[in-house]
Image (spheres, rainbow, N blue to C red):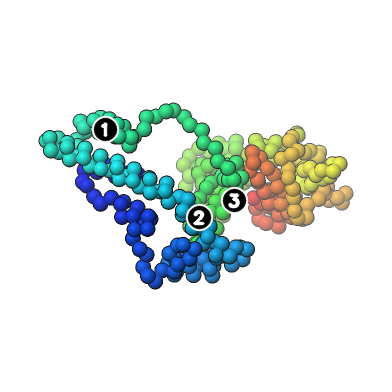
Amino acid sequence: STRHTSTSLPKHAELANEMAGFIAAPEWYASVGGLKIHLALLKVVEETVCPGTGFSPSYFWACLARLTAELRPEVEACLARRDELQAKIDGFYERCRSSGGDPVAPEMRQQCKAFLREIGYLEEDRGPVSVATQFVDVEIASVPAPQLVVPSDNARYVLNAVNARWCSLFDALYGFDVIPSTSVQLGAGGVGFVLQGSDATGPAPPSTGGYNPLRGEAVIEFANGLLDEIAPLAFGKWSQVTRLWPKFVGQRQQLELQLQSGDTTSLRIPSLFVGSVGSLGPPNATSSLAAAPAKLPALPDTGRIFLKHNGLHMVLEIDRDDPIGRAALSGIKD
């Protein structure tokens, strides 16, 4: 963008001249494919960038030379236009000051805007526009999720960016105020919250640290409500689920779920289920969940159920050996 200043400064003629070949590169630069390349860049391309890609360094430099030749005229034209605009802006400031005016005074703003429109620095608003792009990864173009832009040469940053799209719902609920804090957890440790149907309305006492099992129950309750919303059952509620497993129906798998009543149900929209891994299966005749304690079913199933809603995947982690999984009727630990 062009500088909008009141002082005439050196412009980009030097850069334009350098691009046009008027400023010679240092003698120690390597000559490759019509280009002058810094030795450090030459080494990186030949020893790190190209190996393993199937493309030779000579092909890389030939492509870069063609790209430079193709784009150079356009870049030079843009730099020349920038210098032209800057010269007009500098002249406007000089004329304004020579006539006794102050170009940065608030009352001059409308005159400045009119001048910038006149020289083509500002364009008129022509209303909404539509822009289409091609060859964009579906994770960026179609899948809604957090996007982090990070330097690719920092592994830790890249890992954080990947994990920003993949996180624990239980951890987020437990540690954040989506579930509000109240005095219902007095003496339970950790921070407070409201359980559905609770009469507790007072402020929460200070945290005493450690895991708060009451807040854990509230997290499970919240998650069951979310599942009722985005993956509703054909009948029954997720809070009533005691076991879930994949089942073949014809050539396709669908998710089967057993309720506290002993009835079996499925997803209202079967296509939300996209897969599973682990040791997940229906209860056998010798271990019926209908007779199991309502609070803590003791069936040793472990695995993952994969659901897909609005283009986003959700994984239900099932592990009854986990403390959180033992506390959930369904065995879902996250």
The residue at which mark 2 appears reads as: 66
Q: Callout 2: 10 Å neighbours few (<14), some, many (20+)? A: few
Q: Callout 1: 10 Å neighbours few (<14), some, many (20+)? A: some
Residue 137 against residue 129 in the figure, above or below: below
Distance from Cα at disc 3 to Cα at disc 1: 51 Å
The residue at which mark 3 appears reads as: 166
Residue 246 against residue 117 in the figure, above or below: below
Residue type pointed to by label 3: Trp
At numbered mark 3, what does the secondary structure look like: helix, strand or loop?
loop
Q: Sequence order check: which comes first, mark 2 or mark 3?
A: 2
Name the residue at 60% across, 63% down.
Answer: 55
Q: Sequence order check: which comes first, mark 1 or mark 2?
A: 2
The residue at which mark 1 appears reads as: 115
Percent position (x, y) of residue 27? 37, 70
Distance from Cα at disc 1 to Cα at disc 2: 39 Å
Q: Is residue 208 visible?
A: no
Name the residue at 65% across, 46% down.
Answer: 314
Q: Callout 3: 10 Å neighbours few (<14), some, many (20+)? A: some
Percent position (x, y) of residue 37? 44, 65
Left or right of 25, for residue 297: right
At numbered mark 1, what does the secondary structure look like: helix, strand or loop?
helix
